Amino acid sequence: MTSAISLTVKKYGWRYAGNVAFWIQRLTGVALVAYLILHVHTIRDLQDPERFDAAMKSFSHPLFKLAEIGLLATVILHALNGIRLTIIDMGVGLTKQRQMFWYFAIGVGALLFVAGAIPMFLYGILKH
């Protein structure tokens, strides 16, 4: 099965795929800022125990647990792509950008996601 990214690479070349990685980095950054705003807003409710308990109850909903798994994927993708970009900016692997993207960002990211998502799923979703 061919992924959309590999089809894009075949059609436009690796240069365009680098642009895709650029936009993925920006979009995951915006998603993380949105999460941070929600997190700070929830922490603000610590002063009122009833409001905090109501917020925690809404966050225990199974759909919200799925959103947390999505947050895990966002954090992993953003972090690994950022590390890859830092390595490239230091001049290491300039000729191996394509392989670094697939092995590092996608391969390692998938392993980390599975390692983190399975316990989150088992505890958060199946608990209800």
Image (cartoon, grey):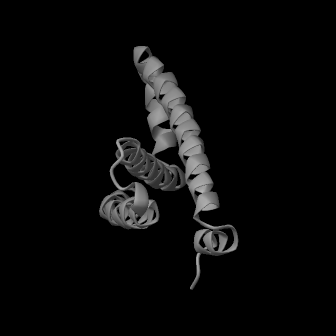
x, y percent for residue 30: 58, 37
Does 79 sit left or right of 66 as displayed? Answer: left
Camera-nearest residue between 5 and 126: 5
- 33 w.r.t. 17: above or below: above
Looking at the rendering, in which quadrant would you find the N terminus?
Answer: bottom right
Q: Kindly identify the residue that appears in the image at 45 percent across and 54 percent down.
A: 73
* Residue 97 shows in this picture: yes
Q: Quadrant of residue 105?
A: bottom left
**Image x and y of residue 51, in percent:** 49, 24
Q: Quadrant of residue 12?
A: bottom right
Q: Position of residue 122 (x, y in %)?
A: 34, 64
Question: In the visual, does 49 lie left or right of 29?
Answer: left
Residue that extends furthest to the bottom in the rendered view of this protein? 1
Residue 57 lies, with reference to residue 96, above or below; the image says above
Above or below, comparing residue 95 to residue 42 in the picture: below
Front residue of 126 and 119? 119
Q: Is residue 7 above or below residue 78?
A: below
Q: Which quadrant of the figure contains the C terminus?
A: bottom left
Q: Residue at x 48, y 49 (%)?
A: 74
| Residue at 69 percent of width and 73 percent of height | 11
Label tally: 0
Q: Residue 108 occupies which quadrant of the picture? A: bottom left
Find residue 68 and report its horizontal and vertical position in percent: 46, 49
